[in-house]
Structures are given as structure tokens and as C-alpha cells.
Image (tube, grey):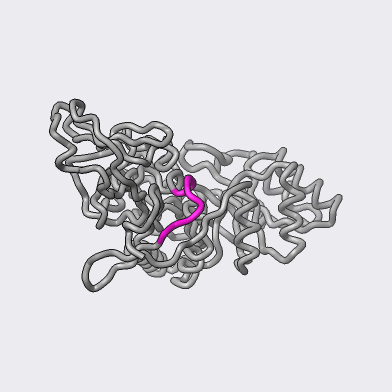
Amino acid sequence: MQLQDLSTPAALIERDRMTRNIERMQQRMNQFDVAFRPHVKTTKCIEIARAQIAAGAQGITVSTLKEVEQFFAAGITDILYAVGMVAPKLKQAAALINKGCNLKIIADNADSAKAIVAFSQANQTPFEVWIEIDTDGHRSGVDPESDELLTIGRLLQHGNVTLGGVMTHAGSSYGLHTPDALMALAEQERRLCVLAATRLRAAHLPCENVSVGSTPTALSAQTLAGVTEVRAGVYVLFDLVMANVGVCTPDDIALSVLTTVIGHQKEKGWAIVDAGWMAMSRDRGTQNQQHDYGYGQVCDSNGTLLNNYHMSGANQEHGIISNVNATCVEDISAQLPIGTQLRILPNHACATGAQFPSYHVVESTPSGSPEIGPTWSRFYGW
């Protein structure tokens, strides 16, 4: 199958780029001699997770219990559910554990810890719980220097509940864009998570695992002393936000959306395509970064960057392609005639991937003309 055989819009994954991204991250973790547990929420795809494990990953990280169900059914058993646990979800988690899934759950407050212990005692279900640590004030987690950390740790020592370790995510790294700032945050993430583990151990509480990670910090850390594993997710495909952060280039981005020019507004210098925000998502993650890509960077059908163009606007099923120079009104119909196929690189790979039920794999050929290989399914739900 060739690209022109696909109905648009369609999600494409460049296999060579994806493989290179996987190998780059895994080799880096191997050099640090730490385990790597990729976050598979970006792709939610069995075939891609298997490629990550084949490269050396040890277990996976997920963001929904539906992901746990799907990946466990595919034979992957070592899974960290990296969203704070609440009581209504414990029954679903327990069912997976009782089937043999080596599921780890997390908590960052005493109320969650108490709910987990109470459910465990009432249902005789064993839970391994990791405490989420706040190392950058970004979102969730307990202060590594607080008394609450030890309170949670002690609560998780009752019945069939085991304190398995600590974990953190330096999500504020997405707002950085210099190597020095990224290295500093990576060290802060490592130091504070290790501090939490040290305090738990000093209080005679177990803390076997020390898990850190985001794509920018994983690729910027200069030392991982005291860390047992690293997690990262978007690295497998990359996106324009990561390009702005500085941990990849647009040529590393493995995900794109194939779209077709369906019309023009010549007086405005617009080409209209059949990929709107239902295909690209509404994520405008580059809007406040150093380079605003609109709704995505335009490439030709072979994936070559067309740096003069971006997707400047989007409606539900229509996208607007225009010159990045807003004052430049050209006869875009001559440059991008009706029927022209384009690829759009996404701002946020997780959000764009979530718009599609499957990925079409693009295979490189000796001739340089891309061919369509297998179709990989992607799943949804919680």
C-alpha cells in the first residue's frame, strides 16, 4: 500500500524514527545502569510496547486501569499505575492483581493510603503501593521533607499492603528549553526523590524502588545515583513541544497526521485540509514556547519539512494551512493544489494519537518512497 491509498486524515508512525528513539533512550539508561520503565500512555499500542520491552525495558508505566487490562491481557505483567489511587478504583485494581498482574499503585496522601489498607483488609487483597513525591511543584505528590511522607509510609505497613518505594515526575521540565535548566531540574528530581527514600529508610520503612522520570529529565540527567528506575513516555514518538524543549528535532518526530488539501481561500493565502482539531487535537502546547507551530508543522507527503507553512487554524474537520509569515499572502493554490497530500507533525503526540483508533506504519524503502506497512491498533477508555 502507498500513502495515496489511505483515506485521510490518518495517523502515521515512521518505524525507523520510532526505533531510533527507542534505542537512544534505552542505551542511555543502560549506560546509567538503571532499569527503564516506559510510560505507554503516549501510544497505548501493544506492538510499540513490545518493541520497547524487546529493546530492554523492564515493565511499563500506565495512566489508566484500562491500559493495565489491555497490556496484561497481552502478556505484560509488571505494571505501574502512575495516577493516584482512590477508593472507587480499588475493586478494578484488585481484580487485576487477583488474576496475576504484578500491579503497583501509588498514593500521595494519608486518605488514599487509609482507603487502600481498609480495602485490602476487607477483601484480603495484597497491594504494593509506591508513594508519589513532589519534586518540582508541578502537579501531584507529597513534599519529600514533610512529616506527611512518613505518616503515609507508616500507614502502608498494615495487613497485605506493602510499601514498594517512591516515584516522581518532573513535569515542569516541559516548560524549559536550555540544557543547563534541564540538567538542573533532572538533578533536583533525582536528589529530592532519593531524599524521600532515605528518610523512609531512616524511619525503618522499606523503600526498594526509587523511580524518577520525564522525557526531558531522562535525556538530561548527568547522574542517577540512588535511582533504581527511570520512566519516560513521549520520547518514543516525540513531538513539537519536545523539539522546543530541546531534547529532539522535528526530524526525530515519528508521529504525523496524513491529510489532503480540499480547498483554498486564495485572498487569505490559505489551503484547507481535511484534518481539523478532531485529528490534531486542540492541544496548543507550543503556543507559549519559543516557536509557536500553531496546530502543527507541515511536511510534504514524504515527511520533508515545509518550514514556510504551519497549521494556523483548525475547526472540527477542517484545518487551515498558511504561511508562517502572517503578512505573506501568496497564491497558495499553486504551491499546494487540491488533492495534495501533506503530513502534519503534532504539538503533543499523546493528544494527537488519542484522536485515532489505529496507526499506519510507514516503512522506508531503498528507493526513498515510503510504503505503508502494518496497521497497529490503539485502545481507549479508563
**Stretch in magenta:** 353-360
Image quadrant in which you'd find residue 76: bottom right
Is there any visible trace of residue 324 in the rendered image? yes
Question: Compared with residue 359, is residue 266 higher up or lower down, i.e. above or below?
Answer: above
User: Can you give x and y, in whole percent of width and height, for residue 307 in the image?
Assistant: 19, 44
User: Can you give x and y, in whole percent of width and height, for residue 91 in the image?
Assistant: 77, 49
Residue 161 magenta-highlighted: no
- 123 vs 3, left or right, is right
- 234 vs 151, left or right, is left
Residue 359 magenta-highlighted: yes
Residue at the spot x=31%, y=51% of the render?
247
> Which of the two residues, 257 or 106, is positioned nearer the viewer here?
257
Question: Compared with residue 228, is residue 189 higher up or lower down, i.e. above or below?
Answer: above
> Which of the two residues, 113 or 366, is positioned nearer the viewer here?
366
User: Can you give x and y, in whole percent of width and height, for residue 35 in the image?
Assistant: 49, 66
Residue at the spot x=71%, y=53% of the render?
93
Is there any visible trace of residue 180 in the rendered image? no
User: Can you give x and y, in whole percent of width and height, for residue 89 in the image?
Assistant: 72, 45
